Each structure stands twice: as structure tokens, then as C-alpha cells.
Image: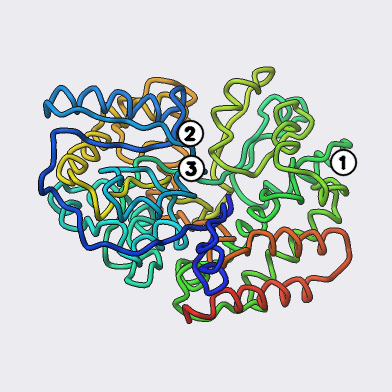
Amino acid sequence: MARFTRSTKTLAALAAVTTLGLTVSGCSAGGGDDGASDTLKLWHYEGADSAMGKAWAEAISIFEKETGATVEFEEKSFEQIQKTASQVLDTDAAPDLMEFNKGNATAGFLASTGLITDISDAVAEYGWDEKLAPSLQTTARYSEDGVMGGDSWYGVPNYGEFVGVYYNNDAFAAAGLEIPETYDEFVAVMDAFVAQGITPLAEAGAEYPLGQLWYQLALTQADRGFVDDYQLYENPVDWEGDEITYATQTLQDYVDKGYIASDVSSIKAEDAGVSFINATSPIFVSGSWWYGRFVNEATGFDWTLQAFPEAELSLGSSGNLWVVPENASNKELAYEFIDITMRPEIQAIIGNNGGLPVAADPADITDEKSQELITAFNGVLDADGLSFFPDWPAPGFYDVIVQELQGLITGAQDVATTNANLGEQYDEGTAEYR
């Protein structure tokens, strides 16, 4: 789940209109509702069969009935919006409302350049802030420099995501083991599986899962202050401190003890997920975005998803955002549509189709597996535990994490060198914010 933040190097990429960036052809102070028609121009990139696609289709129907306005929906791909948004947002072709990626280099960049609207007044008017947990609000609010967690609202999320632990209940039962409730029990069951000749953790070192496990291990030793320093640049991050040293050393221990396959450095996320689906590995630390697929494909055994044992902080964040372009012709209609998507009946559609609604009534979630997912997510929200993703702070840091952890687990470098290399790249990438 790589995300990128804005730097001088990133801005150069943005100007080139790469897939990792955006371009700006010049900001206009226009927009607003002057001369608006009764048409809401809407862009989003959710598939029609996805949880959000189904929910928003119903929201369109309700919106048109209640307002008498027409929704002009343009089907866009994620890549299309990423590549072309800033080219059209300061023109008359701008939509009134669109889904956009959260994070500093995406929604934050558009906010800092004046291409999307500060919707703080609408948030207060409709009470959306009262429906969103504090950790979900972070990715919706930006500073004047485009850094998330600022004072002004530039978007509203309708769904969330988090990283937890998937367990194969049948494999545990066959091994005479119980699902762990504490971290010590988590380690004990991994030892037990290894003793039975089973590699317990489905992992991937060629892509994101291993880096997410590394960050989760750091979070087990961390508090919210560490997260704010790491993600929001409030204070320098100590790359020789207890949190990161523990994470890197423990990850190496996992490989040395056989909890993770010795060839993990060449394994991709898809391979790791399939190894859980095929019941090859009984434990998988990864995100809620796998949940719907596991419901459909991991049908040969009983399984569950829980938060990482004893962790008060978990990887995760809001989903993508509804944003209102500054040049939108019908901002008030956009706000009415956003409000409909926050209603319990629309949130329930997200929740009953494998998504993670942010404002659902639990009584409206009737699907048993969906209830399990939402219960786990709500537990993280109730603890204000969402702590974002390890690659977010600096541009290109995703690739740095992958490369450095590969060096660690292959034995090419030790813990101290790995941490030093990570810290050097992090500091370089975040220098403009500190």
C-alpha cells in the first residue's frame, strides 16, 4: 500500500505527469455555484461489483430522488484520475465531486495548490467530524503545506482499512493449538508449528507484506507520539531507538527461527496470499483488503481475522476521500451527496459486501463474516489505534523498505546497518518538513 509525499524530487515527477504524481497547469480562483445547473458531475473509480461501487450506486439513486437533480457519472480508473486530475481541476471540465487518493502527495498536494476546496464549514454543518474516529480524520485534514493531520478539511472518507492477523482455525485445531490472545502466545504457536515442520507465517519480502509486519512490530513498542513523529514529522525519529531496533531485530529472529520461509525475499504479495488461501501457511499478517477475496476463495477451511495480539496501535487508515474541486459548479450538491454516503443504510451496503464502513450501525450488518471484520476494525478505532503505513512519510520510501529488509533477511547486512540505511533515506525524504 505504497503512498508518497511531496518533495522537490517528487514535484519534478509531478510536472512530468508520471503515475506517481500529478501536474498543475496553473490554479484558478474560480468555481463555486454561480450558474450551476441541477446536475452533479461525479467521478469515482470503484468497480460496480465492489462494496463501495454498490453503495454509491444506491446513493446516486437516493440523491436523485431526494434532490430532483441528475447525477452525471463518468467512469474513471484510478490511474486516469491520478494522471489527469490536476490538468482538468482548474478548468470548466472539473467534476463537482470525485474520489481521490489520500496522503500528502495526492490529496495533500491538491490541497496545497488550491485545486480542491477547504470543506471545513460543510464538515461542521453536516456533522461528519462526529462520525469519524480521530485516526480516520487525519488523512482528511491537511495543513497549508499539504501535510495530513492539519487544521483544514479537504476530504471525507466513507470506508477504512487496517492490517491484522489472519488465522487458519482448522490448521490450529489440527495442530492442537488455540488462536493466540497475547504476543507470547503468538510466538508460542509459531514455535509449535515449526516443531511440526510447518512454516507458520505467509510472507512476502519482494513487496509490501514484510514491511508492514516490520512496522507492526515497531508499533508494539510504540505510543502515539512515535507515530506522530514518524508520520507527521513532529520530532526527529530515532532510528537506533527501542521501537525500530526491536522491529528489525525481531524480524531477523523470525527468519532465523523458521517462522518465515528462507526464500521470502523473492516472494510477492500475491504468492503470500495464495499460500494462506491454499492452507500452506496458517498465519498471514496483512490487510483487510484481502478479506473479500478470502471469503470467496479460502473456502476449504474456517478462518478469522483479528488485530495483532496485544497491539494498541495497528497499521491502517481511512480509505480514499471524497474531494470537491475548487472549480466545481455545484458544491452544495456535492455536499448533499457526501452526506447521503454517510447514512447508515449506505454504510450498511459497504459493510455487508466486504468493506469497512466508517459510520455504520452494527445492527445493520447482517453478514456474519462482515460482522467479524467490522468488529475487529471497530476495536482498532475504539482504541484510536490506526497508525497509517510505513512508507507514507517520504517519496519512494516503499522501495527503500523493501530493499533494506531484503538485505536484512538474506544476511547481506545486519540490524544496525539496516536501520542506519532506512534512517538516512527517511531523513533525506522528509527534510523539507522538519
Can you tell which mark lies on residue 195?
Answer: 1
Identify which residue, 278 or 55, lies in the foreground.
55
First along the sequence among labels 2 and 1:
1
What's the CA distance linking mark 1 and mark 3? 50 Å
- Image spot of residue 160 (x, y percent): 42, 43
Which of the two discs, 1 and 3, sits closer to the camera? 3
Which amino acid, by three-letter code, is at mark 3?
Gln
Q: Residues within 10 Å of mark 1 (few under 14, many from 20)?
A: few
Which of the two discs, 2 and 1, sits closer to the camera? 2
Give the colour scheme shown: rainbow
Q: Which residue is mark 3?
A: 80
Which amino acid, by three-letter code, is at mark 2?
Leu
Which amino acid, by three-letter code, is at mark 1?
Ala
What's the CA distance linking mark 2 and mark 1? 31 Å
Identify which residue, 28 or 177, lies in the foreground.
28
- Up the image or down, 326 lies above or below 40; here it is below
Q: Residue at x 13, y 48 (%)?
A: 33
Q: Residues within 10 Å of mark 2 (few under 14, many from 20)?
A: many
Element under label 1?
helix
Left or right position of 244 against 371: right
Q: Which residue is mark 2?
A: 373
Q: Are marks 1 and 3 in contact (CB under 8 Å)?
A: no
- Image spot of residue 353 (x, y percent): 44, 24
- Figure quadrant of residue 199: top right
Left or right position of 227 against 401: left
